[in-house]
Amino acid sequence: MRNITFVGQVNEQEQQYFEEFFEEIFVELEEKFGPIDEMNVCDNIGEHMIGNVYVKFENEEDADKCVKGLDNRWFNGSPVYAELSPVTDFREACCRQYELGGCNKGAFCNFMHLKQISRELRRKLYGFRAEYRGGGYYGGGNWHEGYFFFKIFSPLWLSASSLCRA
């Protein structure tokens, strides 16, 4: 029983794989398309949320370039589908129970369960921006300040468990 890991709880190796994935995606997108204000990965396993990555760019042009640039791209053996998201405030889409430490619906909850990165990686990727925003759950910034988003969806779950098999 001691080796069982529940959704939302990961062992050290799984967290390391996830953070490598997160950093790889973040760095590539920021270098190619422009400054990223925030990036989130869903930890849910429901069909409509599995593998979703949400990236908030500082401006619409960068988000649009990214969507076009990811067309015909593949990751971990699966196609990447990118689109601009009409959602401007992801706070309402996040599961409050999960944020407080446990959701009674588990990984199939219809509200977003955001997978967290370490404080060290947040500082490395966001630099002074993480400090400015307060480094909170959402970086302390507002998701509704007129910035734009896009969603990457891959049918293959981009979690630590799938990266282990890659």
Image (cartoon, helix red, strand yellow):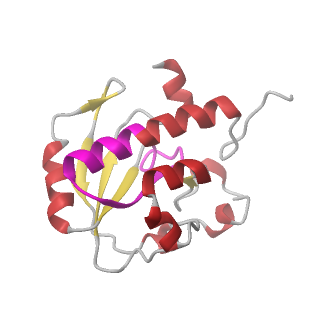
Q: Is residue 29 above or below residue 150?
A: above
Is 98 placed left or right of 158 in the picture? right
Viewer-side residue, 155 vs 16: 16
Viewer-side residue, 162 vs 124: 124
Q: Is residue 100 above or below residue 77?
A: below
Residue 145 place in picture, x, y as percent: 34, 80
Q: Quadrant of residue 78 in the image?
A: top left
The span picked out in magenta is 24-50
Q: Is residue 20 magenta?
A: no
Residue 143 place in picture, x, y as percent: 40, 74
Is 151 placed left or right of 106 in the picture? left
Q: At 45% across and 19% down in the image, what residue appears?
A: 166
Q: Is residue 91 visible?
A: yes
Is 120 placed left or right of 12 in the picture? left
Q: Is residue 43 visible?
A: no
Residue 13 place in picture, x, y as percent: 65, 29
Q: Hey, which residue is sitting farthest top in the picture?
A: 165
Q: Hey, which residue is sitting farthest bottom in the picture?
A: 145
Q: At 73% across and 60% down in the image, what residue appears?
A: 101
Q: Is residue 31 magenta?
A: yes
- Count of numbered circles in the view: 0
Q: At 44% across and 69% down in the image, what residue appears?
A: 90
Q: Quadrant of residue 61 in the image?
A: bottom left
Q: At 41% across and 32% down in the image, what residue appears?
A: 156
